[in-house]
Image: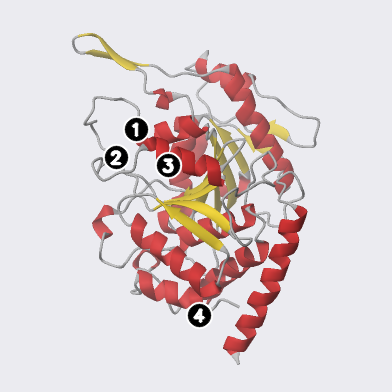
Amino acid sequence: MSLLTRNVCRALMQGTYMTHMGKGVHTTSVNADKNVCYAPHSISTLQSSSTEGRIKCTLIPGDGVGPELVYSVQEVFKAADIPVDFESFFFSEVNPTLSAPLEDVVNSIARNKCCIKGILATPDFSHTGELQTLNMKLRNALDLYANVVHVKSLPNVKSRHRDVDCIIIREQTEGEYSALEHESVPGVVECLKIITAAKSERIAKFAFDYAVKMGRKKVTAVHKANIMKLGDGLFLHGKIIPASPIREDDRGQLLHADGIEPQSVRCHGDPNLYGNIVDNLASGLVGGAGVVAGASYSAECAVFEQGARHIFSGAVGKNIANPTAMLLCSANLLAHVNLHPYSRMIKNAINKVLTDGKVRTKDLGGQSTTKDFTNAVIHCLT
């Protein structure tokens, strides 16, 4: 009986999907799912290579436990009969001889307009002497200027703080991660932090637009303009405040940010390094790296990946990693391409498993495996 019900639901979802495809996908419309951000332009010509009404998506397993988490996503998509085909690339900086060329990966994402990606490990030194990491090269090639991480308390996940619901928006194409370093004289290294008015205004507009769509009343900026008066000062005072009820507020210095109650901060708009720090710290407030999803956006494409940069190399092959974050990323991807019924189905299944509490991975205080959690989610798909 449950199998019959599930098949009927899938048939109805397929009909809904075809209706959406007939209308075209446009990201400036009212969001049907307010837990995911959309790129600012239309993607009605989403997949030039799609066949039979299916969506084609680039898939990068990443390093560490990334391949195991991506496998969970593929298993859930298969069980739910989701009309998405993956174009997979092994892409890695720690295994450069096996990695696909950057150009091939960039072309695939640019063609498909969407990608789901595991975390890429960044070695402490470069084999080629280059200062830019593979992550930085990918972001710059696609102009993935806006990183969005939605830190939200999940049902029945124990943490010190409750009812956290914070969106962190980070500019990630300049700042401290500009890869401009040199040794001026022996023993003295200069590392340049690049802040431009154009990119500061662009990320500010993105943050305010996103806040309007998500119903947030203010955008908080993290800075150290009292010390870096020109660099952070340009980012802080160069913001554009649109004609909307959203206001820029709480311009807290980074060192004081840990004294703010997390429930009081609803939307962040941060420079590169500060946003990266806040992303990872905030993830710990709601359960850790295994439960927080994120995404990076350009004007043309979106890359969905975990919100916290942690490859969990110590768990590789042990079947203990938590796939929740990657499954939430996949749900956000589905919402992004207008497959909202499937997106809601996966999120509801995750919430059911967490609420029930019988299947928990080790990071959430249980003893269940990655496969156990994945199977539990599949069982709750309705």
| Residue 163 visible in this rendered orientation of the protein | no
Q: Amino acid at mark 2?
A: Glu
Amino acid type for the residue under numbered disc 1: Thr
Q: CA distance from mark 3 to mark 1?
A: 15 Å
Q: Which mark is residue 93?
A: 2
Q: Earlier in the sequence, mark 3 or mark 2?
A: 2
**Is 152 left or right of 371, judged from the image as shown?**
right
Q: Are marks 4 and 1 in contact (CB under 8 Å)?
A: no
The reply to whether the C-beta atoms of the residues labelled 4 and 2 are less than 8 Å apart is no
On screen, residue 323 versus residue 123, left or right, reads right
Amino acid residing under circle 3: Val
Mark 3 vs 1, N-terminal side: 3
Q: Residues within 10 Å of mark 4 (few under 14, many from 20)?
A: few
- Label 1 and label 2: CA atoms lie apart by 8 Å
Rendered residue at 42%/58% (across/down)? 290
Q: Label 2 neighbourhood size at 10 Å, few (<14), some (14-19), many (20+)?
A: some
Q: Residue at x 41, y 23 (%)?
A: 178
Cα–Cα span, label 4 and label 1: 40 Å
x, y percentage for residue 51? 59, 58
Q: Which residue is mark 1?
A: 133
Question: SS of the residue at dot 4?
Answer: helix
Which residue is labeled 3 in the image? Answer: 105
